[in-house]
Amino acid sequence: MELTYIWHDCFVARGEGFAAVFDYWTDPETSGGDPRFLDSLDPARPLYVFVSHHHKDHLNRDIFGWAERFPKIHYVLSKDTVRACRHILSSTSVYSGPKVERGRYTELKPGMTASFGDIKIRAFGSTDIGNSYLVETPEGRIFHAGDLNAWVWTDDSTQQEINKAIGDFKAILNDITAYLETQADRRISICMFPVDSRIGGEYYTGARMFVRAVDVVHFFPMHFGLGDASEQRRHRLDATRFGLYANPDRGDYIALQSPYSSFLSH
């Protein structure tokens, strides 16, 4: 399976018979029009487009125009995304732009599942809004956290708020581990997870907790595309301080931070 970083929280995963795009926002190497990575995707194969939630750094509504290029496209959308894009998803709206037929998207809420041949999708919760996604493929499991994290804003929070943030994260993490414990193979092959130092000194807490609770084979930090150029450079560097959060007993920790940098698992 090949994983390509695009920007911020957007990655493209490619398997033997499918491609999946997670949380497309922007392509810094494309000025207008469709992102460049679409040219490398085979229109004859299924393309799954995931949106964890409708915040502007996780959703670009241009994704719905991709249906004209990819006859086997299917959108996996959180409930709040469906609500925010109802004019595009409704056949009776007065919206004049590209629309998506009902059979080409699936709305998932936490706890819900969907299957498309060999691809099985399970939605888990988020500590912001929307979903995180566990995608089971013949090549292995993919987890995209969306905005699931222990959002511990150390400098701006009371101890009570910090405890709640960690407690909320633990509750969803427990849901994930409870599901994995029912499986013969409990590993997640590819995990994309926020490691965002904008929140202060404890920015790595969620990642540290996650990789100690879950057997992650390949971990990819994300969510460092906000702020000006100088801030982004600092956040990217902070995300690679793997010694702060990596599980010393298992897993590889890989920094894909330049647009279109890729990793190929074997």
Image: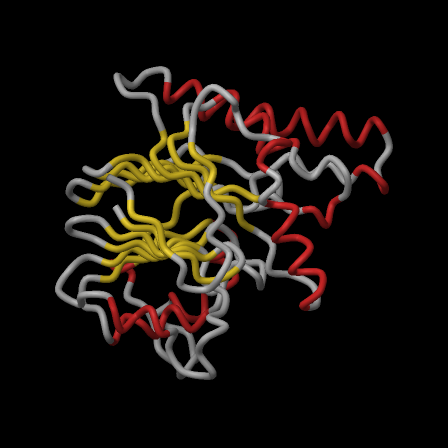
Residue at figure coordinates x 26%, y 53% from the top left: 14
Vertical position of residue 247 compared to residue 98: above or below: above
Percent across and percent down for residue 204 are 65, 36
Q: Nearer the viewer, residue 78 or 227?
A: 227
Q: Nearer the viewer, residue 214 or 241?
A: 241
Vertical position of residue 151 compared to residue 42: above or below: above
The extreme left residue here reads: 44
Residue at figure coordinates x 73%, y 28% from the top left: 164
Q: How is the image coloured?
A: secondary structure
| Left or right of 157 on screen, residue 93 | left
| Left or right of 7 on screen, residue 235 | right
| Left or right of 5 on screen, residue 47 | left
Residue at figure coordinates x 28%, y 40% from the top left: 114
Residue at figure coordinates x 52%, y 53% from the top left: 53
Vertical position of residue 179 compared to residue 155: above or below: above
Q: Nearer the viewer, residue 197 or 60?
A: 197
The quadrant in which the C terminus is found is top left
Percent across and percent down for residue 236 are 61, 53
Percent across and percent down for residue 128 are 62, 44
Percent across and percent down for residue 57 are 57, 61
